[in-house]
Amino acid sequence: MSARRGRNFLFFAMAALLASPVAADPRALPVPAQVIYPGDKITSAMLVDAQDAGAPESNVLWERADIVGKVARRTLLPGRPIPSFAVEEPRAVSTGTLVQLVFEQDGLSIVTTGQALQNGFAGQMVQARNLDSGIVVTGIVQPDGSIRCRDG
């Protein structure tokens, strides 16, 4: 008798949840107002708020702040939800580009030219090749696109 009562409670709880106005209330979802191509930096003007019709995707971006300022990794179509994997931080360094390598320690500052071996955004650790010596170094990408090298 107890198991039956538990099943009835579960059934009525689920029915109440599905019938509640909170569950049926659509949320505003930022979607592209126009086609956004890979590599485009997303601005607020490129987005409009659409009423969600219960998008089953849990990996879509629901907040405008999570989208604006990012770069599209793939084509984003108007009116479609934006998956979280479809945008990324803007790159400060791209593979193969020339960058400044900066090493500072105890008041000594050495600046030379290198070639980025990885894509990276500000604050990310990447590898670069020192063009003078050919040595591969590791460092942190700076907002200006230079790489601050670690000790060693």
Image (cartoon, rainbow, N blue to C red):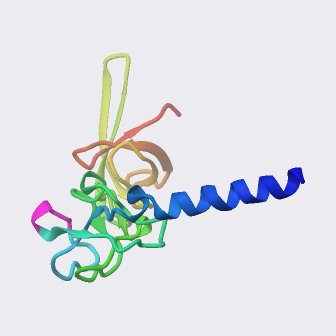
Taking the view exactly as shown, the residue that stands out farthest to the right is: 1
Query: Who's the residue at 42% across and 46% down the image?
Result: 124
Residue drawn where x is 52% and y is 58% of the image: 17
Vertically, is 5 above or below 85?
above
Tell me residue 123's x, y (percent): 37, 42
Provide the major secondary structure of the magenta segment.
Answer: loop
Q: Is residue 85 above or below residue 127?
A: below
Looking at the image, which residue is at 32% across and 34% down? 110
The boundaries of the magenta stretch are: 41-45
Horizontal arrangement in the rendering, residue 111 relative to residue 126 (left or right)? left
Q: Quadrant of residue 114?
A: bottom left
Return the residue nearer the eye: 32 or 70: 32
Q: Is residue 148 magenta?
A: no
- Does the segment drawn in magenta span residue 43? yes
- 120 over 33 or under it: above or below: above
The number of numbered badges drawn on the structure is 0
79 to the left or right of 19: left
Q: Which of the 4 quarters of the picture holds residue 35? A: bottom left
Where is residue 151 drawn, in percent x and y? 49, 31
Q: Is residue 121 left or right of residue 44?
A: right
Q: From this view, report whether residue 61 is shown above or below residue 138.
A: below
User: Which corner quadrant of the image does residue 143 belong to?
Assistant: top left
